[in-house]
Structure formats: structure tokens, C-alpha cells
Image (cartoon, helix red, strand yellow):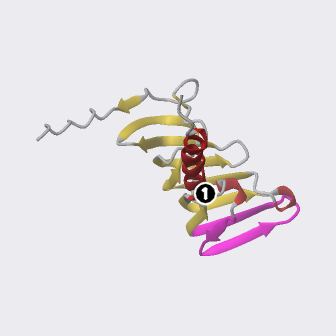
Amino acid sequence: MRRDGPRRLAAPALLLALLAALPVARPAPAAPEPRSQPVRILADQAEVDKKAQTSTYTGHVELTQGDLRLQAERLVVTAPGGRLQRVEASGAPARIEAVTPDGRHVTGSARELRYDPVKGELVLRGDGRLTQDGNTIHNDRIVFDLASGRLRAGGRGSGSRVEVILQPPAAEEPAP
């Protein structure tokens, strides 16, 4: 029977000490939730109605909030108590760009856009078009949940059929 017990215990203890001294890779801090970021609006004109708690912007309007960017000819913002509740945009067309929580880029356009930052919901009405990962959906009414990625198009009052264009998967390159 060998008596090198303390040496056997020293090796694992040394290994644990070395591992504990190594720097730990920490995940990058998550990007702030878009709804918690400030809203910036640029426009040619602005009109504020304190009683209705709305503000109306016209002429080359741009709204940004985090990764969300909206461009329109006219924008009406409803903000009771100074808290953004609803954004309604119109244009020929109005356009939106956003990044979903999973990092996917989404673009959309329609004659009318309604964005609900509380729900994270985007509604496109009138020649609506939404594109994500090269895939496109087109209809007069599209409802898209930016947080979950859930999408509904068509239905009652849409006035047209839903058109979906799906891109084929990218061909894999042959192995060398």
C-alpha cells in the first residue's frame, strides 16, 4: 500500500486553485429594452395638444427609439402623462425598421403604421409590406408582434389576398 495520499490530494487542489484564478468570460450586457430608451423625433413642424395629450409632427418626420426607426410624412404621438402609448404614422409610404429581441432585422412599409410600444405591436394598413431575413409578406393589413415574432395578415377588412415570398435556403458550399 502506497503512502502518497497527501500528494494525490495536492494535485486536484492545485488544479482547482488554477481554475479559480482564470478570468471568467462574462456575457455582454444585454442591450436596453427599446421601450426603456428615449424617443427622438425630427420633423419640419410640431403641434402639441396638452388636453388631448397628443403631439402631431409633419414633414419629413423621423422617430427613433433604440433600434427602432420610423419615417413618415405625418406622425401623431399619444403620450398620456408623458409616457409613450401609441404612435400613428402615415405617408406614401410610411416606413419602419426594427430589430427583434433575437437580433433579426425587420423592415416594413404601408400607407398607415401604428406602433404600440406597450404591447410591442406594429400594425401596417394600406399596401403593407413586411420583410425579415429576405422573406416578405404583403397585404392591406398586417399585425406584427416585435417581441414574439408572431404575425397575422389579411382577414376581415384587409381588402386583398395575402402574398408571401419565401427565400430558398442558402446553398451550402462544398467541403474542400
Above or below residue 99? Residue 38 is: below
* As drawn, 25 above or below 118: below
* Quadrant where the image shows the C terminus: top left
Q: Nearer the viewer, residue 39 or 78?
A: 39
Please indicate whether residue 171 sits to the left or right of residue 121 in the image. Answer: left
Q: Left or right: where does residue 49 sit relative to residue 139?
A: right
**What residue appears at the point 54 percent right and 60 percent down from the top-left corner?**
69
Q: Secondary structure at mark 1?
A: loop
Q: Residues within 10 Å of mark 1 (few under 14, many from 20)?
A: few
Between 27 and 24, the one lying in front of the other is 24
**Image location (x, y in percent) of residue 105:** 46, 49
Position of residue 84 relative to residue 101, above or below, is: below
The quarter holding residue 42 reads bottom right
**Residue farthest to the left, as pictured:** 176
- Residue at image position (51%, 49%) is 111
Q: Which residues are magenta?
A: 38-59
* Residue at the disc numbered 1: 31
Residue 49: in magenta span:
yes
In the picture shown, does residue 28 fall above or below 132? below
Give the left or right position of residue 22, taking residue 107 as reference.
right
Q: Quadrant of residue 46?
A: bottom right
